[in-house]
Amino acid sequence: GDSVTQMEGPVTLSEEAFLTINCTYTATGYPSLFWYVQYPGEGLQLLLKATKADDKGSNKGFEATYRKETTSFHLEKGSVQVSDSAVYFCALTPGGGYQKVTFGTGTKLQVIP
Amino acid sequence: DAMVIQNPRYQVTQFGKPVTLSCSQTLNHNVMYWYQQKSSQAPKLLFHYYDKDFNNEADTPDNFQSRRPNTSFCFLDIRSPGLGDAAMYLCATSRTGSTEAFFGQGTRLTVV
């Protein structure tokens, strides 16, 4: 079945540092790929998405590129802020009739001033 | 704004006392999902409705039921909550042919 693997956390960075959170996936067909963010005590917010190979999703300074050849969707940000502290989930949907979301285990990011 | 709304945001229930969580949507999506997210874990799909058709995940306990009286509303019923059912419950919707699911803010359930 489909699966998503993302790097273990927690990740602790100083403000303005560069962020990379690695994500790889296993899926049949042509999945869509997502990054969701979850702030403490809150639900999931869609951060960015990409629906086909070589697409780049971007939002709020975060970027991720759909790499079919490496089955990867790594999240990057050039300069993190304290307000970016949250848990980040890489996820995929398979396409087709319904969109069951398969999540990675989540990576907790803590940004210190 | 069209959205997915979950009520209440926080729910405290007693051990063994039935509890119902609700979800409504203004997106007119035909598919609705319930996920369970325990502390520090990824969300886990419990079941989904594809239109009126109910689809249970194989490992969802019988203690969990769901109702969808119309397109806009979906309920999660926990018949006899145990301490292990304390979690964040997330409702999501999607539309056939779309690529993404839209999530509500979640209901955090505490069992005492």
Image (cartoon, helix red, strand yellow):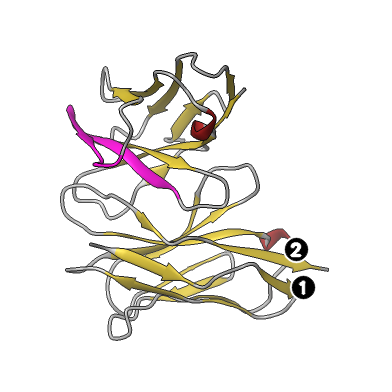
Q: Main secondary structure of the magenta part?
A: strand
Q: In this orientation, which residue lies closer to the viewer: A20 or B72? A: A20
Mark number, residue B59: none
Is residue B58 in the magenta section? yes
Could you tell me which chain the residue with mark 2 belongs to? A
Q: Work out whether B74 lies above or below A60.
A: above
Could you tell me which chain the residue with mark 1 belongs to? A
Furthest residue in direction right, as rendered = A113
**Amino acid on which disc 2 is placed:** Val
* Circles 1 and 2: CB atoms closer than 8 Å: yes
Residue beneath disc 1: A15
Q: What distance separates the C-alpha of mark 1 from that of mark 2?
A: 6 Å
Q: In this orientation, which residue lies closer to the viewer: A95 or B95? A: A95
Q: Work out whether A59 lies above or below B106.
A: below
Magenta stretch, residue numbers? B43-59
Mark number, residue A82: 2
Q: Position of residue A24 (x, y in %)?
A: 38, 75
